Image: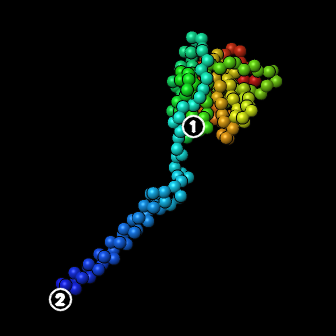
Amino acid sequence: MADADSRAAARTATLIALPLALIAGAVAFWALGGLGGGNGGKQASGSPSPQPSSTVRMAAPSLAPTPTTVCRGLIAQLPSKIRSAQRRPVSAGAEQNAAYGQPALRVACGVAAPKVAKTATVYELSGVCYLAAKQRDGSSVWTTVDRTVPVAVTVPASYSGAGQWAAEFSDTIAGTVPSSDTAPSGCH
């Protein structure tokens, strides 16, 4: 009789424990984000945000042979990621243009050299001298003024610290684009 009582008790314990274990597992799965649970389907604040892979529209004017070579060298040395912004494909001029993140942070090599007034403020950022210009849409364009081939970095308005974003490219620019002898006096 004791053996039958033990089996009955074991069956009862199993019938109670199995559904409780399944419920606990389902709650844990939901709390960890399974099936959109836990945080409303949003990513946790510490996880990386989705990165767009769509093509960024950029112009690609024809360049002379020397700027073409310099720009190819620059673009080839740019990293695949700036901070948390992944590099994205560009619509034209992959040998002279690059884009990162959303909204797109853009790098254009071989742009027209900006006219720098004697009273203009220039910024030396990590060994490269830039002239900053605010655009109508709130973005800012940081164009090198101390390089033989000008490079423009367009920083969207939604990015805080625009100069710091431009400076992210300074080491690569300094290492691949030769310095100019005609840099404005405020550069060095």
The quarter of the picture where residue 57 lies is: top right
Indicate the secondary structure of the residue bearing disc 1.
loop
Q: Horizontal and vertical percent for residue 45? A: 55, 52
Query: Which residue is tagged 1?
Result: 101
Q: Position of residue 25 (x, y in %)?
A: 39, 65
Horizontal side, residue 39 vs residue 163: left or right: left
Relative to 89, say whether 29 is above or below.
Answer: below
User: Which of marks 1 and 2 precedes in the sequence?
Assistant: 2
Q: Quadrant of the C terminus?
A: top right
**Three-letter code for the amino acid on which mark 2 is drawn:** Met
Vertical placement of residue 112 versus 20, above or below: above
Of residues 27 and 79, which is closer to you in this image?
27
**As displayed, is residue 128 above or below residue 33?**
above
Amino acid type, mark 1: Gly
Is residue 130 visible in the rendered image? The answer is yes
Is residue 179 at all visible to an observer of this figure? no
Q: Residues within 10 Å of mark 1 (few under 14, many from 20)?
A: many
Q: Nearer the viewer, residue 131 or 126?
A: 131
Q: Which mark is residue 1?
A: 2
Q: What residue lies at 75% left-to-right and 24% top-to-bottom?
A: 186
Question: Residue 15 in the image: x percent, y percent?
Answer: 31, 76
Furthest-top residue in this view: 65
Q: Residue at x 68, y 14 (%)?
A: 181
Q: Residues within 10 Å of mark 2 (few under 14, many from 20)?
A: few
Q: Where is residue 184, by image quadrant?
A: top right
Q: Residue at x 53, y 39 (%)?
A: 52
